[in-house]
Amino acid sequence: MARYVGAVTSPRSPDEVFDYMADFANVRDWDPSVVRAAVLAGTPGELGCRFEVVVRTLGRETALVYETKQVTRPSRIVLEAQTAALTSVDVVTVTALGEGTEMTYDADLRLRGPLRLVDPVLALFFRQLGDKAAAGLRRELGR
């Protein structure tokens, strides 16, 4: 299992941060491993909305279809993607601060089948990807 948890503070309101994060197609703006992302079906911020996210890792592109599994506006959203090789669960938590918002991003990536043997290596690699994505979130949400 590879897991990355990061928190970002933003001068934006909780509603603005929630709406930005609930539209998971925005991942292309803050995660440098994402080649492209788009809404496939539904409305961002609503249960069942689906997104295609194409990532490039180790020179290879992989398409993931994320679905919004839980929504508690404006404080929490859960997105999940499954392939034959992995399951990714991303939980976004939005908390109002005195001025602005804190957003916590918790990404849990689990390899499936025989690939589970390389989980320790994946955890190190995922941490590096997570740090770059967190820097992108700070840049995007800090505006």
Image (cartoon, rainbow, N blue to C red):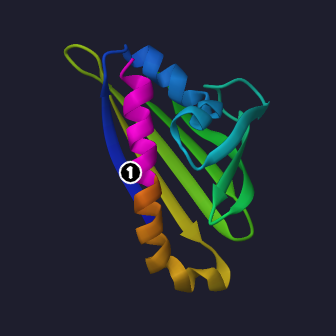
Let me know if residue 1 appears in the view.
no
Q: Residue furthest right?
A: 41
Q: Check if residue 65 falls in the magenta segment.
A: no
Vertical position of residue 35 compared to residue 98: above or below? below
Residue 32 rendering spot, x and y as whole percentages: 55, 45
Prevailing SS of the magenta stretch: helix
The quadrant where residue 87 appears: bottom right
| Residue drawn 58% across the image and 57% down it | 88
Would you name the residue on which mark 1 appears? 131
Quadrant position of residue 60: bottom right
Farthest-out residue, left? 98
Q: Position of residue 102 (x, y in %)?
A: 30, 29
Q: Position of residue 42 (x, y in %)?
A: 76, 27
User: Which residues fall within the magenta stretch?
Assistant: 130-143
Q: At which x and y percent is residue 36?
A: 71, 40
| Residue drawn 73% across the image and 63% down it | 83
Q: Crowding near pointer 1: few (<14 within 10 Å), some, many (20+)?
A: some
x 38%, y 40%: residue: 135
Q: Amino acid at mark 1?
A: Asp
The answer to whether residue 34 is visible is yes
